[in-house]
Image: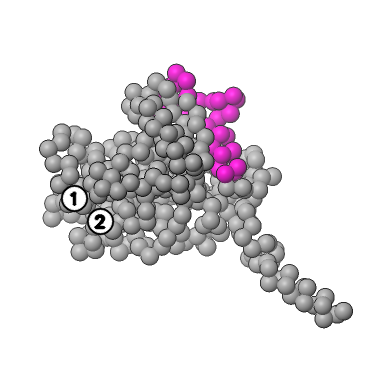
Amino acid sequence: MKSILNLCILLLILSCTKDDNNKITPENSSPTVKLNTTYEVNITEDIIYAEGLSHNSWNSPNTTVVPLLMDSYVPENNLQNRPLLMLIHGGAFVGGSKQQDAIVDMANYYSSRGFVVFSIDYRLRDQMGTIPQEWVDASSGGAPSNLNQIYAMYPAHRDAKAALRWIIANADNYHINTDYITVGGGSAGATTSIGLGVSELGDYKDEISLSEDSTLSTTNLSQTYEVQTILDFWGNNASIEILELVYGYQRFNSNNPSLFIAHGTEDTTVPFSSAEDLKTIWETNEIDFVYYPLEGKGHGPWGTTVNGKSLSDLSFDFVVNNQNLNVE
């Protein structure tokens, strides 16, 4: 009888893992987050996650090395099993920063409830990051202003992917459970989030070699990830369409992450039809999504409420439900 009891105890121990505080937690258990603001948030600014090149003109031989920065928002608790949110600011790939007010507010909202949050900077249009020659060839003859913005999308996506790989490489330091990854942002940040979550691991990375851009060696190239949830605030699917235009393949399929869509019906910057297109794509591929047409709103309506809930509330509910997080 005693040997059977000892065996049962051994099996129980083997089925669990100890955290740094000697608490035994079930292996592969879902993270626990708080319904309301609970934790103080520790903010660390200007973490260098990689480097990138900045050219004098697109793909010119004259370059400087640019450090790529992010801010972390870490809940002050002893939990060892935390979900991740990476936020990407908007600004038409021309402006904006990781300390955009709405992004900072959302970062604090999620972190105070138990998420580890990172807000990232990435190279903007005027920094002229390296782009693949096939992008130049495919878009020759276009209007220069449009080309500059299209070209800017490549280093922005390259950098966002590098940021996520850095987070994965350092996940243990932040007690992040990498099975629970959300990426999101507004406008260009939402477009980049969709591009990051839907594209394959090699997209916006392998098109350029180390001989063309030696800073790729700083980007944790061996790390892999799988995004579970995308938060789209008035973005579009442009970066995935560009992959189809340039390389001839489509990335939308039934394995894509679930999607939160919020978009102003009177948006004249990123037309509301972009949200309808995304809704159709997710419906066609039978992927989970929620869809909030923000009636009468234009571009960037961060302060909007729907049935008394903020956009942070709505997106939080979606992430929690879609990822089956425990809520207290």
| Residue 289 visible in the shown view | yes
Check contact, mark 1 vs mark 2: CB within 8 A.
Answer: yes
Where 87 sits versus 202, above or below?
above
Dot 1, crowdedness within 10 Å: few (<14), some or many (≥20)?
few
| Residue 85: percent from left, percent from top | 50, 47
Q: Quadrant of the C terminus?
A: top right
Q: Which mark is residue 152?
A: none
Instruction: Choose the circle earlier in sequence order: 1 or 2.
Output: 1
**Amino acid type, callout 2:** Glu
Query: Residue at label 2?
Result: 207
Residue pictured at 50% horizontal, 25% vertical: 304
| Residue 324: percent from left, percent from top | 61, 47
The region drawn magenta spans: 294-322
Residue pictured at 44% horizontal, 57% vertical: 225
User: Position of 36 compared to 89: left or right?
Assistant: right
**Amino acid type, callout 1:** Glu
User: Position of 42 compared to 135: left or right?
Assistant: right
| Residue 91: percent from left, percent from top | 33, 35
Q: In which quarter of the image is the N terminus?
A: bottom right
Secondary structure of the residue carrying tag 2 is loop
User: Position of 324 compared to 98: left or right?
Assistant: right
Query: Residue at label 1?
Result: 134
Secondary structure of the residue carrying tag 1 is helix
User: Position of 182 compared to 195: left or right?
Assistant: right
Residue pictured at 39% horizontal, 45% vertical: 252
Q: Which residue lies furthest to the right in this view?
A: 1
